Amino acid sequence: MTYTPPDPATYSIPGTGRRALMAGLLMIPSVLFYVAIPYVGLTELSRFGINTGYSLGFIVVLGLVLAALGAAAYFAKPTKAYGPLCIAGSVLAILYLLVLAGGSTLTIGVGGSGTFTLLYGGMLTLFAVVPAIRIGSGVMTTLEDLLRPGERLPFDFPAGP
């Protein structure tokens, strides 16, 4: 049985300008999620004398890399680079979340001798399930692109009427 690539009339790949614009728009919530929210949260905690041990530089740099990888994957969706970019972004997201989960104990002094401890590492570890599933998706997309080039294009970019 031989593989026949799909007919180009069955799909319509958006131009590079449109994909670049959409990738840029995709970066906005990614930067908010990976950079702005953690940065503001850690800055606010430090104002009250609560130190979590996370480096703000680490949060900013890794968050920007994660956002850029997500945008690059979106831009590369019609190419064979899409699957590997999804895998790389997902592995990095898992590492990011696990590093954050490793130091996710918040202890606050209450009164003269009491303390209040908040553990949120389990929640961050659970968040790592989503990128773990995306790794499987990236592996399957990579295999499909290698074994049957172009087969997913009619599904990802269906032709208009």
Image (tube, grey):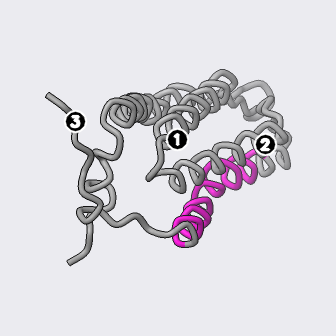
Crowding at mark 3 (Cα within 10 Å: few <14, some 14-19, many 20+):
few
Label 1 secondary element: loop
Magenta residues? 18-42
The stretch drawn in magenta includes residue 49: no
For marks 3 and 1 on the same chain, the one whose residue lies earlier in the sequence: 3
Which mark's residue is nearer the viewer, 2 or 1? 1
Q: Is residue 67 above or below residue 129?
A: below
The location of residue 92, given as percent across then percent down, is 61, 31
The stretch drawn in magenta includes residue 26: yes
Q: Is residue 55 above or below residue 105?
A: below
Identified at 42% across, 34% down, the residue is 138
Task: State how far apart marks 3 and 1 are (Cα).
Answer: 21 Å
Which mark's residue is nearer the viewer, 3 or 1? 3
Q: Decide if residue 110 is on the left or right side of residue 26.
A: right
The location of residue 20, given as percent across then percent down, is 59, 65
Type of the residue with mark 3: Tyr
Q: Decide if residue 60 is on the left or right side of residue 149.
A: right
Identified at 70% across, 50% down, the residue is 35
The location of residue 2, given as percent across then percent down, is 19, 31
Residue denoted by label 1: 81
User: Quarter-wise, where is residue 139 in the image?
Assistant: top left
Viewer-nearest residue: 96 or 106 = 96
Mark number displayed over residue 61: 2
Identified at 74% across, 53% down, the residue is 40
For marks 2 and 3 on the same chain, the one whose residue lies earlier in the sequence: 3
Type of the residue with mark 1: Ala
Residue denoted by label 3: 3
Which image quarter holds the N terminus?
top left
Residue reaching furthest bottom?
A: 161
Q: Are marks 2 and 1 in contact (CB under 8 Å)?
A: no
Identified at 55% across, 39% down, the residue is 85
| Type of secondary structure dominating the magenta stretch | helix
